[in-house]
Image: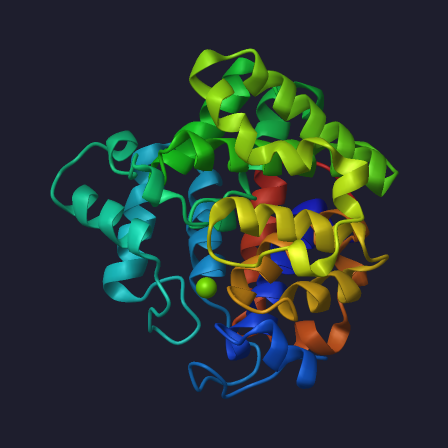
Amino acid sequence: MSNSVLGGVMGLSVGDALGVPVEFSTRAELSENPVVGMGSFGTYSLPAGTWSDDTSMTMCLAESLCKGLDYKDIMDNFLKWITTGAFTPFGKVFGVGNGTRRALEKYARGVPPLKCGGTAETDNGNGSLMRILPLVFYLESAYGLEKIQSEEAMTIIHNVSSLTHAHSRSLIACGIYISVAAELLRLGDLAAAVETGIGKAIQYYFKRAEFNEELKHYQRLSFLPAFVNTPKSQINSSGYVVDTLEAAIWCLLNTKNYKDSVLMAVNLGGDTDTVAAVTGGLAGLYYGYNSIPKEWLAVIVKRDYIESLCNKLYKTLKVNNK
Ligand SMILES: [Mg+2]
């Protein structure tokens, strides 16, 4: 039997590892030579199954949530990761985003956790979106899936984003993502779950003046049926948080299984590992752990470590079986 933590987090890790060898490859290069499975020795010259900062920071959050919600403890894990190579495949940290690095430097200088994330408009990389997923399990356990869009739960999502990314656009991206994740766990139909998840989050932000102005950046996602049919040429797969979220939702809704969704994400090019990780987290939640190709899971570096942490979080929180 598998559980939703295992499905979501392994879905994310496998997407990350699929994207690592081709990070920064263009869409044109990948359409000539598409990724069809776990590759190796690409951008960073690393063996197949090597995952990156996306999975590392997700592990940092998951490990901390096993002990409850403590922003300082989450930041301590991030700092341990970036300074000592803990939570990495081979003890080496690579591909860290600028926003994350700056926030952790502030934290190391004594700035309080919730004051570390950048608040400028240029601070909207996908660095908090890529690591936010485990929070859905904590919130499910604390409030129930139906209450994910409540003030209390949304504030926690925003706070966990703010540790490294505190601009309201990044907070909204994380809010939409967790709202979609919750509906994927709650509802049986993929398109209905995504539409409900986005709709409930947008409704929440629409009513709050501090977010209202930012919603124009999420206009395409708020008209979901039209968005799904957007031509690929108009889907950007950069490291900008809105692009990454859009690309992930688009890949999820234009495919019918885990494998195709993450391959589509990687082959969009650009920020391949994060776009595939963000896609893979949702696809893993929806299709379940058993839908992830066994040959991909088999090569994930430190698979046992990641899976035992997932099972620990699952047992601690006693959340959804899937
Ligand atoms: Mg990465």
- From this view, report whether residue 174 is shown above or below residue 249: above
The location of residue 101, given as percent across then percent down, is 26, 54
Name the one closer to the observer, 187 or 174.
174
The reply to whether residue 318 is visible in this rendering is: no
Quarter holding the C terminus is top right
The location of residue 274, given as percent across then percent down, is 53, 59
How are the colours assigned in the image? rainbow
- From this view, report whether residue 26 is shown above or below residue 63: below
Name the one closer to the observer, 123 or 58.
123
| Extreme-left residue of the structure | 109
The location of residue 139, given as percent across then percent down, is 58, 28
The location of residue 78, given as percent across then percent down, is 32, 51
Please give left or right for residue 273 compared with residue 222 in the image.
left
Name the one closer to the observer, 41 or 68.
41
Residue at x 50% of width, y 73% of height? 23
Residue at x 55% of width, y 86% of height? 40
Place residue 103 in its image quadrant: top left
- Count up the numbered dots: 0
The reply to whether residue 49 is visible in this rendering is: yes
Residue at x 78% of width, y 53% of height? 288
Please give left or right for residue 38 compared with residue 66 in the image.
right
Place residue 135 in its image quadrant: top right
Residue at x 23% of width, y 50% of height? 102
Please give left or right for residue 114 compared with residue 145 in the image.
left
